[in-house]
Amino acid sequence: MNHIPVLKDESIDGLAIESGDIIIDGTLGGGGHTSEMIKRHGASIKIIGLDLDSDALARTKELIGKSPNDFEFINAGFQDIDKVLKDLNIEKVDGILLDLGISSFQLEVAGRGFSFLKDEPLLMTMKKNPTDEDLTAKDIVNIWGEESIANIIYGFGEEKYSRKIAKKIVEARIEKEIVTTFDLVKIIDEAVGKNYIGMRIHPATRTFQALRIATNSELSNLEQVIEKGFNCLKIGGRMSVITFHSLEDRIVKRAFVALREGGKALIINKKPIIPQESELKINPRSRSAKLRLLEKI
């Protein structure tokens, strides 16, 4: 399967990479952005690639083959960027690239329940092999209280029928444990399916987004990586962040504005960069992507 990196040229151009630079790809995913950086700059730069999903590391290694690049593959979440650099004895870097979208591999191959179109175990964790200590979507829908479930579906999914869905989830789990994605899709459809007739998105879209965000602490991790990542940048270093929904974009925008107003950074693009029509034709999934760029001063 070919994973198409979103806003590939715009996000890499925005980093203004030069020979000798150290770049962190905080979300390796399908390896598309990293392989493009290697294609452009070869052995003249060092890339540190992070991903919580060990499959992403393996895919990137396979994609780049015997690369001349000085590369570090780290199985870690980007929120631990400071710890990773400390372990590598690297104090500052020149660029950080974050593509916050879920990869095609995770949606279609991982088998962890990210897609409501496939019947899979309801995990939604970025980790390939979660332990009993790791939170899963299955835990949330079977254990959490109705109000808590409703709050995350509304807060993280911006789903206006969150309370109806949460109520139906709690009713359904009394009869039978909710184990698979199709178990949950059936419950959501019964709760609100009629309200989605004629709408462009599936009734489960927002709920699945919310559960994935909650399971992986995505928004709090994003806040952490912007703060920690900015501290790890050299003066003149840049951060390139691609978001895919309004909650992520809002966090990035507010953090960047605060850094600019504090006299610490320059915002490269006042308005987010979005995919051009040519990219949308090739990769319709890119339609919601927004790129924001920041330079440390």
Image (spheres, helix red, strand yellow):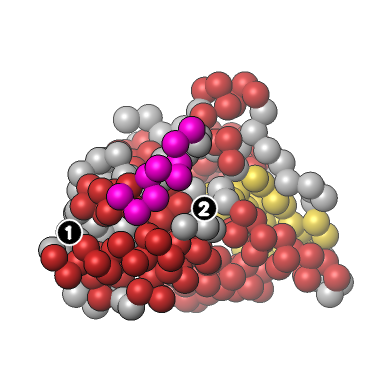
Q: Is residue 105 above or below residue 100?
A: above
Magenta span: predominant SS is helix
Q: Quadrant of the N terminus?
A: top left
Image depth: mark 2 or mark 1 in front? 1
Q: Secondary structure at mark 2?
A: loop
Side of 52 relative to 15 (left or right): left
Judging depth in this view, the residue of 205 and 9 nearest the camera is 205
| Rendered residue at 82%/60% (across/down) | 266
* Amino acid residing under circle 1: Val
User: Badge 2 is on which residue?
Assistant: 100
Side of 193 relative to 283 (left or right): left
User: Badge 1 is on which residue?
Assistant: 179
Which numbered dot is residue 291? none
Q: Is residue 84 above or below residue 107?
A: below
Residue 205 is a magenta residue: no
Question: Crowding at label 2, few (<14), some or many (≥20) Cα neighbours within 10 Å?
Answer: some
| Rendered residue at 45%/62% (across/down) | 162
The percent coordinates of residue 21 (x first, y second) are 63, 53
The percent coordinates of residue 227 (x first, y second) are 63, 73
The percent coordinates of residue 97 (x first, y second) are 58, 52
Magenta stretch, residue numbers: 190-198
| Rendered residue at 21%/63% (across/down) | 172
* Amino acid residing under circle 2: Leu
